[in-house]
Image (tube, rainbow, N blue to C red):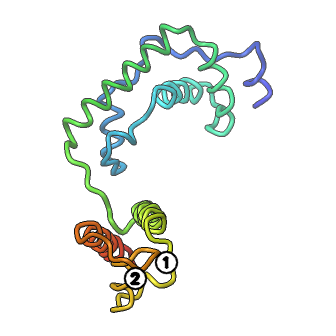
Amino acid sequence: MSENLCSPFYRIQVPFPPSITADEIIKKHLEKGVDNANRTSNAFLIYRHAYNREAIKFGFTHKDISRSASKSWRNEPEYVKNHYKKMETDIKLRFREKVPICFVNSQSKRSVRKRRRIADASMAKINQISPTISASSLPHKTMEWNHRINTDVTGDAFTATLSEDLALTYMAIMQSLPF
């Protein structure tokens, strides 16, 4: 069946304008628990959904139509693609009206990785300012650490505002990391 579907002789015609509406897509996203407008469908995914509807009418499975949907999208005229792109922006705007606030799950792997990247970048900045501070010594909040953070390479004390800023930045980073 996939041979027929990928052949140039067989092409599923997606109706234009599409039979799928923005309300249907928004409803599906809300049912699936999508809580961020940036995670809504893009223009191709909306097209593919309409394409799947047509292909299923002919008895094709989702596995069979995966490659042909992409080929069909590439062959669509620009005005059709622009219509789906306009539909995409409309969905995002209407979705934001229904779900105006996006909460970040601070325990998700993505959030933890982002905090670690921020901490690594901050550590690099601290090490540029004071190379005597090693990464292994920083997690230990001791008097030695306070002394090291307050002195530069020559042993001279930093200005009070700079050392306080560094210490506060470090403390904020260390408290946000799940050790």
N-terminal of the pair, mark 1 or mark 2, is 1
- Residue identified by numbered label 1: 132
User: Mark 1 falls on what kind of element?
Assistant: loop
Quarter of the rendering occupied by the C terminus: bottom left
Residue visible at 41% across and 63% down in the picture: 122
Q: Residue furthest bottom?
A: 143
Near-viewer residue (24 or 87) = 87
- Residue identified by numbered label 2: 148
Residue visible at 48% across and 7% down in the picture: 79
**Residue 81: percent from the left, percent from the top?**
49, 15
Residue 125, by quadrant, is bottom left
User: Does 53 appear above or below 137?
Assistant: above
- Left or right position of 90 against 101: right
Near-viewer residue (175 or 134) = 134
Asked if labels 2 and 1 touch by Cβ distance under 8 angstroms, the answer is yes
**Residue 44: percent from the left, percent from the top?**
51, 27
Quarter of the rendering occupied by the N terminus: top right
Residue 13, by quadrant, is top right
**Residue 103: percent from the left, percent from the top?**
26, 55
User: Does 145 appear above or below 85?
Assistant: below
